[in-house]
Amino acid sequence: MSVQVIFESAAWYAQMCFVLAMVFAAVRLVRGPGAQDRVLALDALYVNGMLTLLMLGVRSTSTVYFDMALLIALFAFVGSMALTKFLLRGEVIEP
């Protein structure tokens, strides 16, 4: 077996594991007993989506996927901060 075949199969396996983790996070997002569980599931969904895009970028050697993963990381951070502020204070924008 060549190194390229081993790399392709390892990248495919890792990508499928990230997709499976996204499915589990989506289930927790829907069924979560509390708001905190749903926020953590959304963060896990963001991270696994970002890692899936990074694996697509590695497999296809295209830089577009890396740019999309960077945007997802940026929006995930802003969204997490807004949700955390909302859960702590009840409002996102202070008057």
Image (spheres, rainbow, N blue to C red):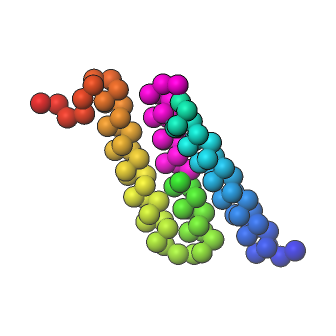
Q: Quick check: 65 above or below 39?
A: below
Q: Magenta span: helix, strand or loop, mainly?
A: helix
Q: Residue at x 43, y 52 (%)?
A: 73
Residue 1: quarter of image = bottom right
Horizontal side of residue 61 vs 85, given as left or right: right
Q: Residue at x 75, y 62 (%)?
A: 10
Q: Residue furthest left?
A: 95
Horizontal side of residue 62 vs 94, given as left or right: right
Q: Residue furthest front?
A: 31
Image spot of residue 53 (x, y percent) = 54, 62
Image spot of residue 91 (x, y percent) = 24, 29
Please provide the residue range marked out in magenta. Answer: 33-48
Residue 35: quarter of image = top left
Horizontal side of residue 1 vs 63, given as left or right: right
Horizontal side of residue 52 vs 75, given as left or right: right
Q: Nearer the viewer, residue 24 or 76?
A: 24
Which quadrant of the figure contains the C terminus? Answer: top left
Q: Quick check: 92 above or below 53?
A: above
Q: Nearer the viewer, residue 25 or 7?
A: 25
Q: Is residue 92 magenta?
A: no
Q: Residue at x 53, y 54 (%)?
A: 49
Image spot of residue 51 (x, y percent) = 56, 55
Q: Is residue 42 magenta?
A: yes
